[in-house]
Amino acid sequence: MSDIRQKLPFLTKAAFGIGSVGELVFYGMVNTFMGIFYNQAIGLSNSLVGVAIMLAMLGDAVSDPVVGMISDRWRSRLGRRHPFLFLSPLPVAICLYMIFSPPEFITQTASGEGINTWLVFSWLAFWTIVSRIFLTLYVIPHLALGGELTKDPNDRSKLFSMNAIFGYVAGALFAFTAWGVFLGGESVLADGTAVPKHLDAAAYPPLVLTSCGLVLFTILLSAYGTKNRIPYLSAPPAPDGKINLLSFYKDLIGAFANKNYAFLIIGFFFFMMSVGLNETFSVFVNTYFWELETREIRWFGLAVAPAVMVGAILAPHIMKATDRKPALIGALIGIVIFVQLPVDLRLLGLMPANGAPELLPILLACSAASMFSLAIAAVAILSMLGDVADQNDLNHGLRQEGLIYSARAFFAKASNSAGHLIAGVVLDVFVVLPFEAVPGQVDEDVIFRMGLAAGPLMSVGALIAIPIYARYRLTRSEHAEILDALNARDNQREDARAADPQPA
């Protein structure tokens, strides 16, 4: 008889985790640099950048459920997840390159002054939408694969811990390299103004090409590294007619009947809204609020790498000692405190002046603490979704990791995109940051308003998420009972097939 809680080999966990590197590099480029690239280096308003991201989210409303449904039901010699892991990386890399390579004829008008705003916006919107569609082809099957590689609760935590370690640590090291090597130092613009390199569009091509190569290599490596587990994965359900969006949304509504799943997704929606705000604000805050040089910004990557690794390694042990929900809520509280603490203290006049030697260590310490908490939260959320998939399997007899993780991915991107849009509008309308702003030469009122937006405003969504997550009720002991019932059911089916074999 089989035991569905058998442990995974370490190399399989590592191969699965490597797959997160490509996703984190893509999002690192888009979330960190796309806003300031198009706003300060190209001259497009932050509001239009936010609108482009929201339009991509509307595309996700179709692509996420379609990929989730197809991935759940796909039949091939490579199983139901791996065909998408092999298909997606090249288109994702191409789209990433195109996002950061708008042609010169749209970034400069015939008179040589300004840009063709609507052509630049259309270019950005098109490639952002297409890139997100192809990224969905990878992310949802990859997460769903993690949900079914193992059903042992502690082993599942370790699997997603490995995913977080590879993703966030590689992302942090990539950020260090991006700021320190590719964008380190200053550029002299045509008018003779010296600006940090990340404000100069001409400095980006080597960074973009390197990013595309990393996306392509790491995703394919993950696909090959987990390919040997295909015979052990769950089989797709029997065909039940044509796949359509209506059936997905019916299935999704059915999944929301599970209150534990509903609380996870709704809480995640509000949490990711704060993440979207922070992702947009952070590069502007580091550049203009703290007036950090690129050689200083690069250290954030190395500071958070060990913090993420420790958080991801400790997450399974914390959840084993306290259960998943307390670990998640504690991590969220840590994120809220440490992300906004330096900004709030500056607004109160309690932080060192810009340029003071003690400023950077304080910022790095708070960033490391927030990322330590974020790593724990990421492992907890993904593990809890896998537990809910087991609960739904017992209740309805269906393995629907694709549905569950695609809904998580869609709500994450929807709220994250809303956060980016809100942040863009806030920068244009409330902060009123001018184009071609030079660090150290921005009006003090603008800097103060930027602090208000990046501190108290940014944390509202995460604060709302905490009491929602607190209503999650699936405990470790209840999940153990679910696994026992699933194991007994599967063994009973094996015994029945052995007693009544089908004729050849």
Image (cartoon, rainbow, N blue to C red):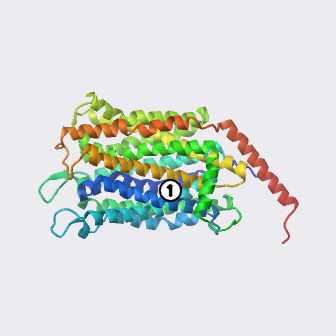
User: Which residue ends up furthest to the bottom in the rendered image?
Assistant: 504
Q: Does the image show residue 292?
A: no
Within-10-Å neighbours for mark 1: few <14, some 14–19, many 20+: many
Amino acid type, residue under disc 1 in the picture: Gly
Expressed as whole percent of the image width and height from the top left, the position of residue 484 reads 75, 44
Expressed as whole percent of the image width and height from the top left, the position of residue 462 reads 45, 39
User: Which residue ends up furthest to the right in the rendered image?
Assistant: 499
Expressed as whole percent of the image width and height from the top left, the position of residue 94 reads 40, 67
Q: Quadrant of the C terminus?
A: bottom right
Residue 113's image quarter? Answer: bottom left
Q: Is residue 96 left or right of residue 481?
A: left
In front of the other: 248 or 482: 248
Q: Is residue 222 left or right of residue 482?
A: left
In front of the other: 255 or 200: 255
Q: Does the image show residue 405?
A: yes
User: Which residue ends up furthest to the left in the rendered image?
Assistant: 192
Q: Which residue is mark 1?
A: 19
Relative to 233, does residue 169 appear above or below in the rendering? above
All told, the count of numbered labels is 1
Q: Residue sitting at 25 percent across and 40 percent down?
A: 289
Q: Secondary structure at mark 1?
A: helix
Q: Residue sitting at 24 percent across and 57 percent down?
A: 41
Q: Residue sitting at 29 percent across and 46 percent down?
A: 427
In front of the other: 148 or 265: 265
Relative to 168, does residue 497 appear above or below in the rendering? below
Expressed as whole percent of the image width and height from the top left, the position of residue 114 reads 19, 62
Relative to 246, does residue 428 appear above or below in the rendering? above
Q: Is residue 402 left or right of residue 481?
A: left
